[in-house]
Image: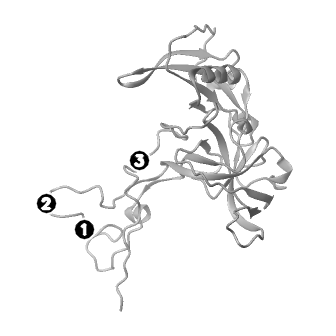
Amino acid sequence: MPRAHKPRSGSLQFWPRKRARRIYPRIRSWGKTEKANLLGFIGYKVGITQIQGIDQNPNRKIKDPIVTAATIIECPPLKGLSARYYKKTNNGLKVIGETLAEKLDKSLARKIRLPKKVANKEIKEYDDIRLLMYTQPGLTSIGKKKPEIMEVALSGSKEEKLELVHKYLNSEIKVSDIFKDNTFVDIHAVTKGYGFQGSVKRYGIALKSHKSEKTRRSVGNMGSWTPKKVSFRVPQHGQTGYHTRTEYNKFIYKISNNLLDVNPKSGFLHYGFIKNDYVIIKGSIAGPVKRPVKFTFPIRQIKNAYPFQMIQVKK
């Protein structure tokens, strides 16, 4: 009888498996674009569905419509909070000044302490400039009022970045102003949390036989006698889920504001109705329903991107 081989599950690429600091991730590196533009956006995960369409890949022999899984993200317009000016130092970029927007929503007071008077100073010498934006969850049906704050990098020269900041600082920013259909993005999200779990659920190890020593739902061997320590590679209990994860090169099927094409009669399960612009992305995305999801221009760019002609969304 052949021997069953089951290696331990769980990639060692993600270590340590600890909880995320907050419900939406921090982005440390940004992609590049040819034109001057904002490099990121944030929305709320609606759920996963099925779409029907035609793949425009010329190498595909069958031209019939195909059905594939897709995730919908609702993207209410963002508002500019401030412009941050950075100076390069030996320890990296350092904030040397900030210019606040003229009008800020009252809901922002749930997140930060708002100043009574806005007194901005002109900053001439700087190396980089980024835009601080905040969401408007009150425009959605998720029942949330406290906004999220996101810092977004800009592409282009210093003059082009400054022009973009003046353009977006006191106006609403839509997702269609930044991203387009049939392009790739990187998805940054925090996965669904499962709390403290054992090694069987956490790493997928096999149960020991009923005559084994002591516990049944643990590893049989903690490692060698010397060195006298337990390696991090040994599957053990601990935090499961609620980790920061990034998926590279997720394909955007469609960016639209036609709500009749996507909203079911009774609304989406555990979410409700979509009321703003939305993005349909190929495949699944980390995190539960209603969780904030960030998407940015790809770091590992793919040159050959064949368009996808979407026909309809399953309701």
Which of the numbered marks, if any, corresponds to residue 185? Answer: none
Which residue in the rendered view is the most extreme toward the front?
A: 58
Image: 180 above or below 110: below
Query: Label 3 vs label 2: CA separation?
Result: 27 Å
The x, y position of residue 210, in whole percent, is 33, 79
Amino acid, disc 1: Asn
Whichever of callouts 3 and 2 sits on the residue coming sooner in the sequence is 3
Q: Residue at x 66, y 20 (%)?
A: 163
Q: At 61% across and 45% down in the image, what residue appears?
A: 291
Front-most of residues 230 and 78: 78
Residue density around tag 2, few if under 14, some if 14–19, many if 20 or more, within 10 Å: few
Left or right, 232 with respect to 11, comes to: left
Please say if the residues under marks 1 and 2 sit with CB atoms less than 8 Å apart. no
Q: Are the residues flagged by discs 3 and 2 in contact, CB closer than 8 Å?
A: no
Q: Which mark is drawn over residue 221? A: 1
Residue that lies at the very extreme toward the left in this rendered image? 226
> Helix, strand or loop at disc 2?
loop
Q: Secondary structure at mark 1?
A: loop
Q: Gap between marks 1 and 2, in whole Å?
A: 13 Å
Q: Quadrant of the N terminus?
A: bottom left
Question: Label 2: which residue?
Answer: 226
Q: Which residue is mark 3?
A: 18
| Nearer to us in this view, 180 or 217 | 180
